Amino acid sequence: MIRTGTELRIMFSPGRVRLVQEEAVVPGLRVLVTGATGLLGRAVCREFQNNGWLVTGTGYRRARPRLLRCDLTDEDAIKGLLQECQPDVIVHCAAERRPDVVERHTEAAVNLNVHATSTLAKEAVLDRHHHITTCLCAALCGSFFLYISSDYVFDGRNPPYGEDDSPNPLNVYGRSKLEGERETMRHCPGAVVLRVPVLFGEVESVMESAVTSLWLKVQEVTESCTLDHCQQRFPTDARDVAAVCRKLSERARQDPSIRGIFHFSAKEQMTKYEMAVAIAQAFKLPSNHLIPLTEQPAVAAPRPINSQLNCSRLELLNLSVEPRPFTSAVIDCLWPFTPDKRWRQTVFH
């Protein structure tokens, strides 16, 4: 990862990573973003960079030149990463987030969603303080730790859900995220857990999000396509979540009472069928080939019917953002996949 100007260069040598100071570094807050190759991680990196933070991002399978490759299931790799980077804030986005994949590959998913989270939380407290062995609040000592969790920790039977409502996950993915929450708070009492619903945003492939993947169905106008019209979702723009992560991080560094569980979600309630119809309408495409399916779909991992999150805690502390409207946000991320890449200019200008 190479930063220009007065930032840091990260130099690679066999088996280790070195941070090399190129010039006199202007004092600035440092953030480490895990899962920086993913949908949310990319948005978080961009949000912090745009607000003057020094950003280090990690990836693994999709690591690329401007990111550090780090196996988060390797405890020694995590310890070395934090010792070298010395972040003021860690935003832990990395996770196996596909429920059906988690059902089939449970051990690998638990290693990432639970065990890696546990190690990061422990090291966040110890980092930059010569491995202090007493458990101290990370907001006061070490790195502030922000763990991204999911609305799937709830069963969806009695929404909306507040931060203090009892979780009851229906699938292995939800259980792994809940265990990640518990490991976070056990090892790092000053951490923040941020639960979010299904996300979409700027994607490298439309299949990267369950929301943008509907684009393929919308375009299949020659044959009818059934889509779930039972499970209620609250599709949320990753850019909005990233802004909340930054606001939480900045406030928590000043106020140690910012800790524990928070919820953030967009407010528009939509089934997959309704999302697809909205996408079709946004791009002025036909939608009569889309057929609503009002029975629960057969999937490997059961999903909650309605896991709506009550986000009032963030709002009361003035740490929320106004969610982008679904239609304009989905246009932002899907127009590059239109057959005519000039679509946005010709339609909106």
Image (spheres, helix red, strand yellow):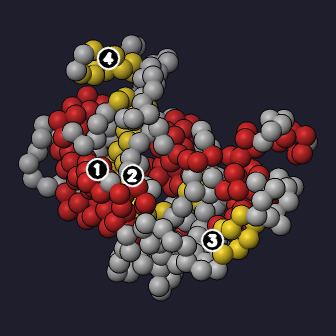
Percent of width and height locating residue 115: 23, 52
Q: CA distance from mark 3 to mark 4?
A: 47 Å
How packed is label 2: few (under 14 Cα within 10 Å), some, or many (20 or more)?
Answer: many
Q: Which residue is mark 1?
A: 108
Looking at the image, which residue is at 47% across and 52% down? 245
Could you tell me which quadrant the N terminus lies in? Answer: top left
Kind of residue sitting beneath label 2: Glu
- Element at label 2: loop
Secondary structure of residue under mark 3: strand
Q: Position of residue 193 (x, y in %)?
A: 37, 61
Distance in Å between CA atoms under marks 3 and 1: 29 Å
Marks 3 and 2 close (CB-CB < 8 Å): no
Comes first in the chain, label 4 or label 2: 4
Q: Position of residue 189 (x, y in %)?
A: 24, 61
Q: Secondary structure at mark 4?
A: strand
Q: Which residue is mark 4?
A: 12
The earlier-in-sequence mark between 3 and 4 is 4
Q: Amino acid at mark 3?
A: Asp
Residue 57 or 342: which is nearer the viewer? 342
